[in-house]
Amino acid sequence: MPRDIKLRRQKTKDRIRGRISGTQERPRLTIYKSLKRIYAQAVDDTCGTTIAAASSLEKGLKDKFKNGANIEAAKAVGAQIANRLKEKGITTVVFDRNGKLYHGRIKALAESARETGLQF
């Protein structure tokens, strides 16, 4: 990937990250996607801790999906992270798309988390 594209993506990510921050009551739901997997974690930025995490690499999801990087896997990860946060009594989050476009797998994960009960 050319240097200017990486720099532009990093600037976008830093700009978004400068505006949002997670707390214990309303953590930051951050998404990372690679070519083979998708990951989501809820972070409390005041303490610097991860409250809950889910990925397409976990046992239940890895066996269920042949490819962990498709929209169906993203929907499953979104539902799983929402369920884990609801178990801890958290219903609202701040969504951090990590500089990526709100499209495809990112959108599928977010909509799945909303359908499961998270608000953002």
Image (cartoon, rainbow, N blue to C red):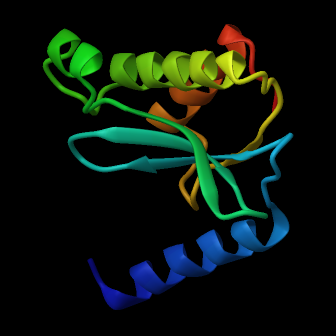
Does 5 sit left or right of 93 as displayed?
A: left
Q: Position of residue 6 (x, y in %)?
A: 41, 80
* Quarter of the image that includes the N terminus: bottom left
The residue at the point 75 percent across, 45 percent down is 27
Does 87 sit left or right of 76 as displayed?
A: right
Q: Position of residue 24 (x, y in %)?
A: 81, 46
Residue 58: quadrant of the picture: top left
Does 74 sit left or right of 22 as displayed?
A: left
Q: Nearer the viewer, residue 90 or 38?
A: 90
Looking at this view, name the residue that lies furthest to the bottom. Answer: 3
**Relative to 43, is 83 above or below?**
above
**Relative to 30, is 116 above or below?**
above
The residue at the point 61 percent across, 70 percent down is 13
Image label count: 0
* Quarter of the image that includes the C terminus: top right
**Relative to 68, is 22 above or below?**
below
Q: Position of residue 101 (x, y in %)?
A: 57, 50
Q: Nearer the viewer, residue 28 or 25?
A: 25
The residue at the point 21 percent across, 10 percent down is 64
Does 39 sit left or right of 85 as displayed?
A: left
Q: Position of residue 94 (x, y in %)?
A: 78, 44
Q: Nearer the viewer, residue 109 or 52?
A: 52
